[in-house]
Every structure is written in structure tokens, then in C-alpha cells.
Amino acid sequence: LRDFLLVYNRMTELCFRHCVCNLNYRLLTGREESCLDSCAARLVRANHRLMGAYVGLVPALLQRRAAEHGAPAGPSGPPASPEPAPEPAEG
């Protein structure tokens, strides 16, 4: 979530600085609005392409990291007890 918000904030700042030229008016001009739409769309498309590539690379990176660190082959958890629990004595 933090990374998403950082990307969103950077995108907003970049497009605002690129497109908004005059701060004397409360509303955006038509040119500013179309520039912002275009800028945001380009950055969103680029972000989607990057995330798609990242998602494709993650499994290979995780496998390589596991191989480098010698990850255990089996599932982790407490070891099973070798002896069964004693049955209650009748008495």
C-alpha cells in the first residue's frame, strides 16, 4: 500500500508540474485537463507494464533466492513425536 501511494503521489506531482502552468484560476483550463488526462494515462500504462514484468519475474527470483539460501525441501513445522501417547490406565 505504501509503494502504491508513493507511485500515485509521484505521478500526481509529475503530471501537475508538467501540465498546470497558471495557478491564478480555481479551475483547470481545457488544455491543462487534457494534458493531465494524457499524462496520467501514459504513466498508468507504463506502471501496468512494469508490474506485469515484475509479476513474471517474481517466481524465478524466489526460486533463485531459495536455492542460494538452501531452503528446506519439506514443509516446516514441529517434528512429529516418534512414540504414540500412552493410553489412560483403567483403575
Image: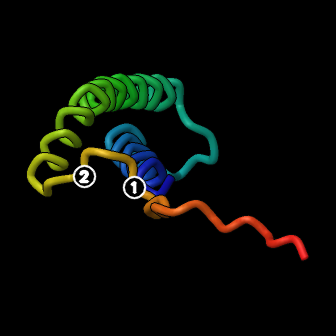
Whether residue 5 is visible to the viewer of this picture, yes or no, is yes
Amino acid type of the residue tagged 2 in the rendering: Pro
Reading the image, the residue beneath label 1 is: 76
Q: Position of residue 6 (x, y in %)?
A: 41, 55
User: In this view of the protein, which residue sits in the foreground, 50 or 29?
Assistant: 50
Residue topped by disc 2: 72
Q: The residue tagged with tag 2: helix, strand or loop?
A: loop
- Identify the residue at the far left of this view: 68
Residue 52 spot, x, y in % from top left: 31, 25
Q: Position of residue 48 (x, y in %)?
A: 36, 26
Q: Nearer the viewer, residue 56 or 59?
A: 59
- Residues under numbered marks 2 and 1 in contact, where contact means CB atoms less than 8 Å apart: yes
Q: CA distance from mark 2 to mark 1?
A: 8 Å
Q: Nearer the viewer, residue 26 or 44?
A: 44
Q: Is residue 5 left or right of residue 44?
A: right
Q: Quadrant of residue 45?
A: top left
